[in-house]
Amino acid sequence: MTRIAVVGTGAVGASIAAWLIAAPEHAVTLCARTPFARLRVETPEGVLESTPRLLTDPANAAPVDWVLVVTKTYDAPGAQAWLDRLVGPDTNVAILQNGVEHRDRFPALDPSRTVPVIVDIPAERRAPGDVVQRRNGSLTVPDDAAGRAFAALFAHSPIDTILTDDWLTAAWRKLAVNCAGAVNALTLQPAGIARDAEAADLMRALIRECIAVGRAEGATLPDDLPDSIVDGYRAAPADSINSIHADRLAGRPTEADARNGVIARLGARHGIDAPLNRMADVVLRKNGPDN
Ligand SMILES: NC(=O)c1ccc[n+]([C@@H]2O[C@H](COP(=O)([O-])OP(=O)(O)OC[C@H]3O[C@@H](n4cnc5c(N)ncnc54)[C@H](OP(=O)(O)O)[C@@H]3O)[C@@H](O)[C@H]2O)c1
């Protein structure tokens, strides 16, 4: 039996927990801030329902084989309180979050037992424990021993686990897409705003800053990335709303630091200025409840 704890049971956490519970060889514990009695996830393959074992107090947690951290990036300190109880000498930890700083957010963990995960599973929460998973999606991890062990947890599920020998580049490519989403969050306009020439220019400029810093960090990013990302925004349904835009509409804190601020912060280490991403981070944070 593989003992697995899922810390953070929102849109993505509930979706992956439902799939993990579906495998009889898994003993899954949900570590939640807001409790619920039933877990119900509408997946592309049908509805997964279960009555999960759920904890709300880290003091009641004990070491497990795997911890999957699925909180928002800004809730890393709260997740650490769980890790303090759940991690023993043989525990592996997977961080399923946005950005490029997965391991940096949890400096106390053994990096060789920590798997950074790029999440491409679109999901929304209707209520605590009640989630819609829109696509089977994918989880991208480094092709190393811990990454392969993580992928094995999902072997029974339709979630695609992608092993890559250049995880850094994959994470910066996703960051390049996400950093441009600040234009949507700042203008409160859905994806269709990318069809506007001025908005598209701003998106490309944000992405160019991301490319410069990403390359300095070691990522391989092509020159045509700004155009291809803007083309992607233009091809999306005009009314689709990205998560940072949705967070802002809902009055929640945003992941602006992990999506834009990080580009300015890491850029400073290399002497690269990223004023647009710094502006996006500051303005989004000053407009939010996390100010
Ligand atoms: N949703 C998507 O489609 C999607 C797609 C790709 C990537 N991602 C990334 O995946 C990560 C998770 O996103 P999400 O959409 O699943 O976020 P979410 O729906 O807001 O879920 C986060 C969960 O973490 C819980 N949490 C926060 N602090 C906690 C603590 N101290 N102890 C236990 N639980 C805690 C929250 O509790 P409450 O229930 O009390 O709020 C919430 O259930 C983010 O980095 C996001 O950018 C999401």
Image (cartoon, rainbow, N blue to C red):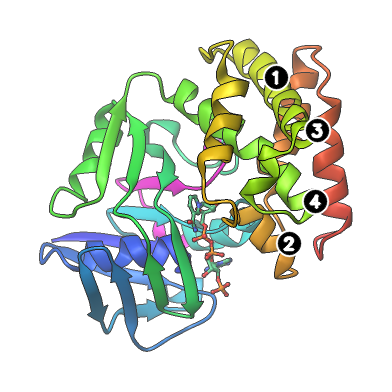
Q: Which residue position holds label 1?
A: 208
Mark 3 is on which residue type? Glu
Tell me where the magenta segment starts and ends, as one range.
85-103
Determine whether the residue tagged by mark 3 lies in a helix, strand or loop.
helix
Determine whether the residue tagged by mark 1 lies in a helix, strand or loop.
helix
Which is nearer the N-term, disc 1 or disc 3?
3
Q: Going 31% across and 79% down the picture, which residue do you hit?
A: 53
Mark 1 is on which residue type? Arg
The quarter of the rendered structure image containing the C terminus is bottom right
The residue furthest bottom is 37
Q: Nearest the camera: 78 or 20?
A: 20
Mark 2 is on which residue type? Arg
Q: Nearer the viewer, mark 1 or mark 4?
A: 4
Determine whether the residue tagged by mark 2 lies in a helix, strand or loop.
helix
**Does residue 101 belong to the magenta stretch?**
yes
Q: Which residue position holds label 4?
A: 187
Mark 4 is on which residue type? Thr
Q: Nearest the camera: 78 or 261?
A: 261
Distance Cα–Cα, label 1 vs label 3: 15 Å
Q: Position of residue 119 (x, y in %)?
A: 43, 45
Q: Which mark is residue 248?
A: 2
Q: Going 29% across and 46% down the picture, which residue do you hit?
A: 90
Q: Position of residue 75 (x, y in %)?
A: 62, 58
Distance Cα–Cα, label 1 vs label 2: 24 Å
Q: Position of residue 166 (x, y in %)?
A: 40, 19
